[in-house]
Amino acid sequence: MVDLSQAPFHLDRGAIDWVERTAAGMTLDEKMGQLFINLNTSFGEPYLDTVVRRYGVGGIRFMGSDSATVQQHIRYAQSVAKIPLLVASNPEMGGAGSIDDGTLVTTHLGAGSSPDPDDAYRLGLVGGRETAAIGCNWAFAPIVDIHRNWRNTVIGTRSFGDNADIVIERAKRYFDGLSESGSAAAMKHFPGDGVDERDQHVVTTYNTLGYDEWNESYGRVYRELIAHGVQSIMIGHIGAPELSRHFRPGIADEDILPATLAPELLQDLLRGELGFNGLILTDASMMVGMTQAMKRSDAVPAAIAAGCDMFLFFRNPLEDLEYLRAGIENGVVTEQRLDEAVTRILGLKASLGLHEKPKDQLVPPVQALSVIGSDEHVEIATTVADHTVTLVKDTQHNLPLTPASHPRIRLYGVTGQSDFTGTDPRGYLDIAREELERAGFEVHVFKDAAQRRAEGEEGVYFHTVMADEASGDYTEKYDAAIVFANVAGFAQEATVRIRWSSPMAAEIPWYVTEVPTIFVSLNQPNHLVDVPMVKTLIHSYAPTREAIRATVEKITGASEFTGTFNDNVWCGDIWGTRL
């Protein structure tokens, strides 16, 4: 059984007694409920009464909203919970992403690109503080995937880098910062994303490294972070054929399963060879990476039987609970496996001190929200932006570009679709215009055909826009062109690339032969595959005012570039990217 006195729980006798006493007093239904983490899709109290009272879930994660709304939501959930809840967040970029008014510090890639390892600590610190203020006690971070395949965009900005050393260093510092808030961490996505180019949200993906190579890279990351004290691990819907074959010689190709369903990866490797004693949870169970592997009625108990202690998100609560019950009754999930999972869940709660807190103290007071978006956190974001903005190339020596040398700027925006958070993907362009004007430039913003038609202009098509834009007097109107790209994609495409506004769009950098052109990526690091013609490329890592202001300061020479980059920017050395 589980030794709760050892890492990562470190429970004393009193806390262990609480776990054992609580588990012994639970019904089968209560034990089953503890194994699920619900995605709360409503802020209504009757909804929470059903989720928390009726189903007795062990944990919750909430949909995004402002911090005051979320804090009250969590407060009510804890008030009606028989056993204190694990309350999860995704503070991958700081407070942003967990709450609408949270501070966006930078991405994991930004923190990995800084010359200062403590920027990863600052990222975790802000994320931990802001999510703890609303009542969260569990962070689905840090991300410890290695971005080995430049085509992989699901972790393109969500990995600290392309090698184990940088991931280990920065993930430890992130964990240290996060831990100051008292939150537990769930590193992800075991056995490791970044080898396959696809997104496990929409298809099962695979880490195809051999056993020895995996151990020297991903395995070393997990060993180091486990030793550093990480309390839980999120399992990806990622298969690892060579690892499965190592532990199950002769396993058939059709029996290679994503790690969430593979006992050889969870029990033999993660629990056995890596010695992980903490809590294991699945990644979101609606991802096609899991659902394509087996039918839901089998997958729910199979994930627990394979070694997962918690199941992330119901599809339908009544159905999923019955699927688990059937798996217990038919022996797929043994009584010992169920009790081990419950013990680890309660153990994690006890390690956070939740068992000792009165219900009315499980969530901080309203006054705690003052830390969210505070001047201190904005200043941290400003400092991190100054460190991380990176000059990838300037082969034409276009920099510095100043209002004195190039006063008239043609400003282009390259935008991906809004993702499921509903965030306005074009908001960055107004910030870019404002910051360029603040620096003293005269800015002329390009509008594509759809934008011009939306403003009431008639007879506008992509070819008429190109004719207007690519005219012989372009250099008489503009002295330089600056392109800001905020191309994000998540859980909708297998990979993400630039999608121009129309065929042969006028914003495609045809103008590089006419005027000095600067391309700034606010998101993905692989844009040179689509714009190899640009001679000056900058990575800024976030569509925030802090990052954009730092970028403009470095473009004008008011500040030095200090950020670094890895070889993924060259897109596998496709011809022309370095020119």
Image: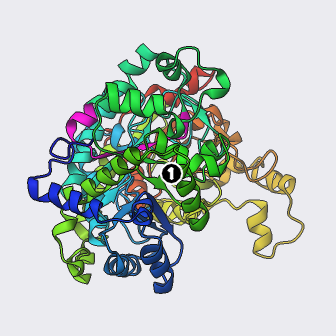
What percent of the width, then of the height, locates residue 112?
Answer: 35, 38
Q: Using residue 422 as the reference point, say whether residue 460 is left or right of it.
A: right
Identify the residue at the far right of this view: 459
Q: Using residue 137 as the reference point, say whether residue 77 is left or right of it.
A: right
Q: Nearer the viewer, residue 2 or 501?
A: 2
Please state, as top left, top right, bottom left or bottom right, where the C terminus lies in the image: top right
For disc 1, the marked residue is: 328
Quarter location, residue 575: top right
| Viewer can see residue 123 | no
Seen in the picture, residue 158 relative to 21 is either above or below; the reply is: above
Q: Nearer the viewer, residue 21 or 459?
A: 21
What percent of the width, then of the height, locates residue 517?
Answer: 57, 42
**Residue 564 belongs to the span the image colors magenta:** no
Q: Residue at x 41, y 81 (%)?
A: 69
Q: Secondary structure at mark 1?
A: helix
| Viewer can see residue 230 | yes
Per the rendered image, the range of residues in magenta is: 224-238
**Residue 233 belongs to the span the image colors magenta:** yes
Quarter location, residue 509: top right
Task: Tell me if mark 1 has few (under 14), some (14-19) or many (20+) residues whose alpha carbon lies within 10 angstroms of its own.
Answer: many
Please state, as top left, top right, bottom left or bottom right, where the N terminus lies in the image: top left
Q: Nearer the viewer, residue 231 or 348?
A: 348
What's under tag 1, amino acid-wise? Ile
Seen in the picture, residue 502 relative to 136 is either above or below; the reply is: above
Seen in the picture, residue 214 relative to 429 is either above or below; the reply is: above
Q: Nearer the viewer, residue 64 or 517?
A: 64
Q: Residue at x 44, y 49 (%)?
A: 402
